[in-house]
């Protein structure tokens, strides 16, 4: 057997193993995530990243509630859900965090909204998406402050060394959030065809 066939077989095996690691509940929302991501960001939208973020936020439970009041697939806090529905009133009428379709669309719109406000990070690069995810998790102000303190055009590595005034626990949790989504979950969804 030649080396190319062996590598292809190993690649298929690894892809199958990664795809098997995503929750079965995600299948119910796959078409919606793909549709919303492409509608907002075009065919190059990071669909697998959004899927990984939804897994991180709620493990695909549309009725998820956190101890601090976040709810739904995307775990929006009520004030954030109300705010984003006012920013995009035609696309996100009402603040319906427990509606899976609204929640998925709101997550995509909010991620792109944050992404657009972080031009200091490399454009069209996972560094900028990592910063946007950090902003979704901890607030846009912290993501922008991290860039100014750095100063960095790369989020990976640079953001880890920034002390932006948060507690050590909050900072560590916020730094782990993009890592888990982009480096752990996103490859699983890519392997499962979430593109």
Image (spheres, grey):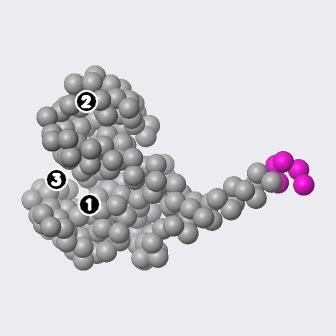
Residue 151 in percent (x, y) is at 28, 22
Nearest-to-viewer mark from 1 and 2: 2
Q: What's the distance in space between the residues labelled 1 and 2, CA to CA?
A: 29 Å
Say whether residue 93 is visible: no
Q: Judge by depth and name the residue closer to the eye, 42 or 101.
A: 101
For the point 20% across and 46% down, the residue is 170
Residue 40 in percent (x, y) is at 36, 54
- According to the picture, the residue beneath numbered tag 3 turns out to be 87
- According to the picture, the residue beneath numbered tag 1 turns out to be 106
What secondary structure is found at the residue carrying circle 3?
A: helix
| Placement of the N terminus among the 4 image quadrants | bottom right
Horizontal side, residue 40 vs residue 168: left or right: right
For the point 41% across and 61% down, the residue is 51
- Magenta segment main secondary structure: helix
The stretch in magenta equals: 1-5
Q: Quadrant of residue 92?
A: bottom left
Compared to residue 166, the image places residue 4 above or below, namely below
The verdict on residue 138 being magenta is no
Sequence-wise, the earlier of marks 1 and 2 is 1
What secondary structure is found at the residue carrying circle 1?
A: helix
């Amino acid at each position: 057997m030649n080396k190319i066939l062996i590598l292809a077989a190993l690649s298929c095996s690894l892809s199958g193993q990664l795809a098997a690691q995503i929750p079965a509940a995600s299948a119910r929302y796959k078409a919606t995530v793909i549709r919303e991501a492409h509608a907002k960001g075009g065919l190059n939208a990071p669909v697998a990243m959004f899927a990984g973020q939804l897994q991180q936020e709620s493990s695909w439970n549309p009725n998820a509630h956190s101890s601090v009041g976040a709810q739904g697939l995307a775990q929006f806090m009520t004030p954030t859900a109300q705010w984003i529905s006012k920013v995009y009133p035609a696309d996100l009428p009402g603040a319906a965090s427990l509606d899976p379709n609204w929640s998925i669309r709101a997550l995509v719109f909010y991620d792109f909204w944050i992404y657009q406000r972080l031009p200091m990070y490399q454009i069209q690069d996972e560094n900028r998406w990592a910063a946007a995810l950090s902003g979704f998790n901890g607030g846009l102000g912290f993501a922008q402050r991290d860039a100014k303190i750095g100063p960095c055009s790369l989020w990976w590595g640079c953001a880890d060394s920034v002390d932006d005034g948060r507690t050590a626990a909050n900072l560590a949790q916020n730094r782990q959030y993009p890592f888990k989504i982009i480096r752990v979950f996103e490859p699983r969804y890519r392997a499962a065809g979430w593109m």
